[in-house]
Amino acid sequence: MYEKPISNNLSAYAEAMVMYSPILIATGKSIDRDDRLIDISNNSASQLWQLSTGAGINYRFSNRCSYQVGIQWTSDVSNRLLASDLKLTNTDIGLRMGVIYMIK
């Protein structure tokens, strides 16, 4: 995370992180590119790598508490499924809002 002060209490931030889930479990059925029905529960025991980046404004209310508003987008780096004919990748873009409280 990189933070650039704008004023005493206001700063802009940019962040990037790589998220790793060692086990991905899915159930159900889907249709592949050739309109064949595939049971995805047999093909989903793979890992999931995701890249998440974001940017926004951080307002420091006190030494321990700050408010954050920004945009965050997360995309899959790896295929979620092992089936060669079935690809499920995802990209999510959303608004990020929250309160950060630091415990010292």
Image: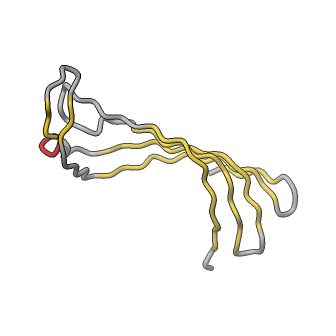
- Give me the residue at 18% from left, 20% from top: 34
Instruction: Specify the quadrant of the image occupied by residue 85.
Output: top left
**Residue 21 position in % (x across, y down):** 32, 52
- Does 57 sit left or right of 16 as displayed? right
Give the answer, above or below, for where 38 lies relative to 14: above
- Give me the residue at 58% from left, 46% from top: 72
**Residue 80 position in % (x across, y down):** 29, 39
47 or 67, nearer to the observer: 67
Give the residue furthest to the bottom. Answer: 104
- Look at the image and tell me in which quarter the C terminus lies: bottom right
- Give me the residue at 21% from left, 36% from top: 30
Give the answer, above or below, for where 81 lies relative to 68: above
**Residue 36 position in % (x across, y down):** 14, 26
Q: How many marks?
A: 0
Please say which color scheme the image uses: secondary structure
**Residue 39 position in % (x across, y down):** 13, 40
- Does 54 sit left or right of 86 as displayed? right
Give the residue furthest to the top. Answer: 34
- Does 16 sit left or right of 4 as displayed? left
Instruction: Specify the quadrant of the image occupied by residue 84.
Output: top left
- Does 36 sit left or right of 22 as displayed? left
